[in-house]
Image: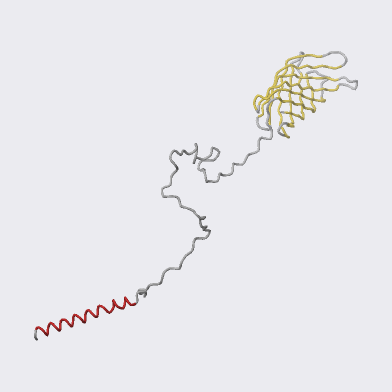
Amino acid sequence: MRPWSILQLSTGIALIGLCGLASPAQAQTQNPQQPPPGYQGPPAEQGPPPGYQAPPPGYQAPPPGYSPPPGYQPPPGYGQPQPYYPPGYGYGQAAPYPPPMYPPPRLVRHGLILGIGVGFGGVSAKNCSNCGGGFAGEFHLGAMITPRFGLMYDVSTVVHPVDSLGTDLTNTTHTLAAQLWLTNLFWVKGGFGLGQIELNDGTFNGQTASAFLVAAGIEVVQSTWFALDVQGRLTYAAYDGGGATNGLVLLGFNWY
């Protein structure tokens, strides 16, 4: 084959190949909007989130890196929790409810104390034909040293009628006493002083001697300043010829 013929044949094959390559590009150029295989289209347009409010007209966003002006000093304690907030609570956080307030004690004993008691009692002594039972009473006045301890003047007596003529035997004890509440209700008392016994038959027939007192009681009714108690008392006075003992059961009225 001649060289010229070989050259013509090669040129024809090259032209055929170029035409084949240009056909897909021309097809792609003629249909530029056709999506590629598997394309599902753009997502649907979404609006603002629920509750969104557009900014007012003329609103300008703060510049990036905004900071307080030069020389600005926050007030003392800024950003710190208030003194009455428990640890962990600061600005922008709700403070918890305060703890419940427990009721105060029902009875607060302080300052001046005053009391009286009425009831029944008896006088006993060795070889005492005029002794026996009768009306009993007590009176005390003093002050509280602590809410459960007080010092006071205490006097108690038993009056025993001897006969229908108005003769009676009276045995009275005057003491400086100390009273201690072992609990909020139960108390004990002790004191030392003088005892006086007298037979009231129209003439003075009495003696005076040293004496002591022991007592105990329980408060059955209480308020913020008053208590009603039930108490028992025992006194002894060392008179000449034999001592005399008083036993008393009283209902006491006490003010604090």
The single residue placed furthest to the front in the displayed view is 58
The single residue placed furthest to the left in the displayed view is 2
- The residue under the point 55% across, 46% down is 94
Left or right: residue 102 compared with residue 54: right
- The residue under the point 43% across, 50% down is 63
Determine whether 244 is above or below 119 in the image.
above
Q: Residue 246, image x and y in percent?
A: 76, 22
Q: Quadrant of residue 29?
A: bottom left
Q: Quadrant of residue 1?
A: bottom left
- The residue under the point 73% across, 15% down is 210
The single residue placed furthest to the bottom in the displayed view is 1
Determine whether 171 is above or below 3 in the image.
above
Q: Residue 48, image x and y in percent?
A: 49, 61
Q: Nearer the viewer, residue 216 or 17?
A: 17
Determine whether 77 is above or below 42 in the image.
above
- The residue under the point 27% across, 79% down is 23
Q: Residue 158, image x and y in percent?
A: 80, 23
